[in-house]
Amino acid sequence: PRPILLTRHGESRDNVRGRIGGDTVLSEAGELYAKKLANFVEKRLKSERAASIWTSTLQRTILTASPIAGFPKIQWRALDEINAGVCDGMTYEEIKKNMPEEYESRKKDKLRYRYPRGESYLDVIQRLEPVIVELERQRAPVVVISHQAVLRALYAYFADRPLKEIPHIEVPLHTIIEIQMGVSGVQEKRYKLMD
Ligand code: G3H
C-alpha cells in the first residue's frame, strides 16, 4: 500500500500574529519545520521514484516544500486555504469586534457559513473533489502540503469522518499525518516533528 502524507505548511508570519488568510512567508520555526520535513520525506520515500509533492499556490506551502529534493512538485489552486473573503487578514478578535453578526453566524454553523465574498467549508469540500480523484488514482506516494481547513476536509474523507465534524477536526502544525490505504481499510500514523 502507498502512503499519503498530509501536513500543514510550517508556521507562517501570519500564524504568529493570529491573522487568517493572507500569503505571508514562514516564521523561523516554520523554516525549521520545512528542513525537518525534507529530511523526513527524503528518508521515508527514498526508494519511491514516482512519489510527488503537492502544494497549494500560496507561498507558505511552496516554501515548506522547497527544501525537499528529488521529487516533482505540483501546485494546486484547489489546495489553497479557505477564502475568508472580507475577513482575510483579520484576527478572530477583530472579526468578533468589527463584524459580530458574522462571527456569531459562523459559530452557529461553521460548516455552512460562507465568509462574505469568500468560501464556506462546504465550498472547500466541493472544490477538493478533483484533488481526491487524483489522489485515489495515484499509485505512488503523495505528500500533500496544504492548510488547516483544506486538510480537515481531506483527512475526513480518508478517515471516514462525518461531514459535521470537519470544521472542528484538529490538524496541528508541524505534524505529519500518514494515511495508508490497504485491503483492511485505512491506517493512520502521526509524526510530530517539532512543537
Ligand atoms: O485561516 C483559516 C484557518 O486555517 C481555518 O481555521 O476554520 O477554524 O477558522 P477555522
Image: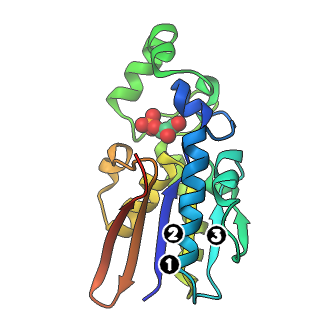
Tell us which disc is closer to us: 3 or 2.
2
Contact between labelled residues 2 and 1, with CB atoms less than 8 Å apart:
yes
User: Could you tell me which residue is drawn at 59 percent across and 24 percent down?
Assistant: 87
Can you see residue 9?
A: no
In the rendered image, which quarter is residue 131 located in?
bottom right
Residue 65, compared with residue 71, is above or below; it is above
Task: From the image, tell me which residue sits under label 2.
Answer: 40
Amino acid carrying label 2: it is: Phe
Q: CA distance from mark 3 to mark 1?
A: 13 Å
Amino acid carrying label 1: it is: Arg
Instruction: Left or right? Give the position of 44 relative to 48.
Output: left
Across and down, in percent, residue 147 comes to: 54, 49
Tell us which disc is closer to us: 3 or 1.
1
Residue 182, compared with residue 60, is above or below; it is below
What number is the disc on residue 53? 3
Q: Secondary structure at mark 1?
A: helix
Task: From the image, tell me which residue sits under label 1.
Answer: 44
The one of 8 and 169 positioned closer to us in this rendering: 8
Q: CA distance from mark 3 to mark 2?
A: 13 Å
Quarter of the figure that contains the N terminus:
bottom left
